[in-house]
Amino acid sequence: MTEPVSFESSPDAELGARLRSALDGPEPEQFLARVRGAVRASGRETTWDVLARWAPAGLVAAAAAAALFWLLLGPAAVPDPATQLIASAPARMDIAPGQAEADVLVSTLMEGR
């Protein structure tokens, strides 16, 4: 095989010729068995193995980011949902003063069809 100087996307002619001769030779099954055995012996990692290896570091990073966010903004920056709901609700529905509130809501919903 030729010594690679840099990455090239063109096929390697020497490697292609060797693979063709091994696969077209008198015993291609033995060549394939050797290749499969080498792949099994190499101990390749699956995607799940990589994710399992990186998961603890990711959890620590997420916890550190959450703690930093909490320290920078402080607990006062997080709004209380109960007071926010009460503050945004109108004191009275003055959509149409002459009609009952239920009629206004029903007619609004029916007109939207």
Image (tube, helix red, strand yellow):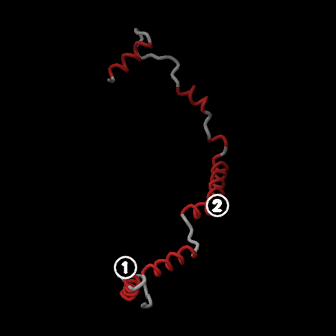
User: Based on the displayed image, in which of its 4 quarters is residue 50 positioned?
Assistant: bottom right
Residue for point 60% across, 32% down: 81
Please give the residue where the numbered disc 2 appears in the rendered image.
57
- Name which residue type carries label 1: Ser
Query: 52 or 108, which is in the foreground?
Result: 52
Few, some or many C-alpha atoms within 10 Å of disc 2 (few <14, some 14-19, many ≥20)?
Answer: few
Please name the residue that numbered disc 1 is placed on: 9
The residue most toward the bottom is 2
Q: Residue at image x 54%, y 63%?
A: 47
Judged left or right of residue 57, residue 92 is left
Residue 52 is labelled as none
Is residue 12 at all visible to an observer of this figure? Answer: no
The label nearer to you, 1 versus 2, is 1
Please name whichever residue, 19 or 14, is drawn nearer the observer in this view of the structure: 19
Q: Position of residue 59 (x, y in %)?
A: 64, 55
Q: In the rendered image, which quarter is residue 44 located in?
A: bottom right
Most foreground residue, 50 or 80: 50
Q: Amino acid at mark 2?
A: Ala
SS for callout 1: loop
Q: Secondary structure at mark 2?
A: helix
Pick out the residue farthest to the front.
26
The CA span between labels 1 and 2 is 35 Å
Q: Quadrant of residue 57?
A: bottom right
Write the residue at 40% across / 12% down.
103
Above-or-below relation of 8 to 2: above
Q: Position of residue 112 (x, y in %)?
A: 33, 23
